[in-house]
Amino acid sequence: MPVAVVTDSTAYLPPELVRTHRLTVVPLTVVLNGAEGLEGVEISPVDAIRALGARRLSASTSRPAPEQFAQTYRRLLDASADGVVSVHLSAELSGTVEAAQLAAADLGDRVVVVDSRSTGLGLGFPVLAAATAAAQGVDLDGVRRAAVDAAERTTIYFYVDTLEFLRRGGRINAAEALFGTALSVKPIMHMPDGTIVLRDKVRTASRGVARLVDLAVESAGDAEVDLGVHHLAAPERAEALLAALTERLGDQVRETYVSEAGAVVAAHAGPGLACVVVHRRSAGAG
């Protein structure tokens, strides 16, 4: 049996891709106003958006338990997988990587864990690269390298209506949030080293979308690219973003994916999110 690929629920891959690539997805836990559930299983993006609209909001997320990963790895190995490559959201944002590493430590060299240094399709594209390599019969280290290489060629930018939700979740510091609120700016963030960093500031949502397009085109350079677009309760914004990207990049574009981000990202980013992920298929200038 080929190497098995595991990821977590924040990759936000379309269900058909999860099935086609035989991926195993371990969900994070979301707590919204005291109601706890597994992302994508018991709590949907709709649940998160509804909770975010409440006047008083308590939202938090937690990593899967190490034992949850251990059970998953053992099941796959017992089913004759040659090994397991487990690819997850940035360790700077979540303890998910640490939990996976704790579980893997008990299974010797049969399981390797990769930190994607991103989330959403910034995680999803490395997962797909790993799964493609595994399906081609590549060995454990080769599958790991496929994920790492894809992560290095993947860039994520996202727009949020307010920095408040990121501040509440501890994903940015209070000074950054206060600065943004005081100037009424619309922030554009990126994740150069696995952490969320303010990349740019605009005054309106329309300018935010336009700036996302500019940044994505700059990141693509002259490479062939796959594009991912996420949104939160803003499908029209996502459609406009993808249309502008495909017009600007033309025949450089190979695959495109649009999806609503899940409850974990919703809890920390808030409604109105627009996100673009650029995966360069080669090391084209960008």
Image (cartoon, helix red, strand yellow):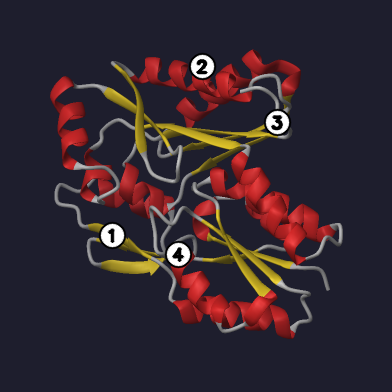
Foreground label between 1 and 2: 2
144 sits left or right of 193 in the view: right
CA gap, disc 4 to disc 3? 29 Å
Q: Secondary structure at mark 2?
A: helix
Q: Residues within 10 Å of mark 4 (few under 14, many from 20)?
A: many
Residue found at the very far right of the displayed protein: 136
Residue carrying label 2:
214
Callout 2 amino acid? Asp
Answer whether labels 4 and 2 touch (C-beta < 8 Å): no
Q: Nearer the viewer, mark 1 or mark 3?
A: 3
Q: Position of residue 132 (x, y in %)?
A: 78, 53
Residue of label 3: 283
- Residue drawn where x is 20% and y is 57% of the image: 58
Left/right of residue 60 with respect to residue 104 in the rendered view: left
Residue 60 numbered mark, or none: 1
Q: Quadrant of the C terminus?
A: top right
Q: Which residue is mark 4?
A: 96
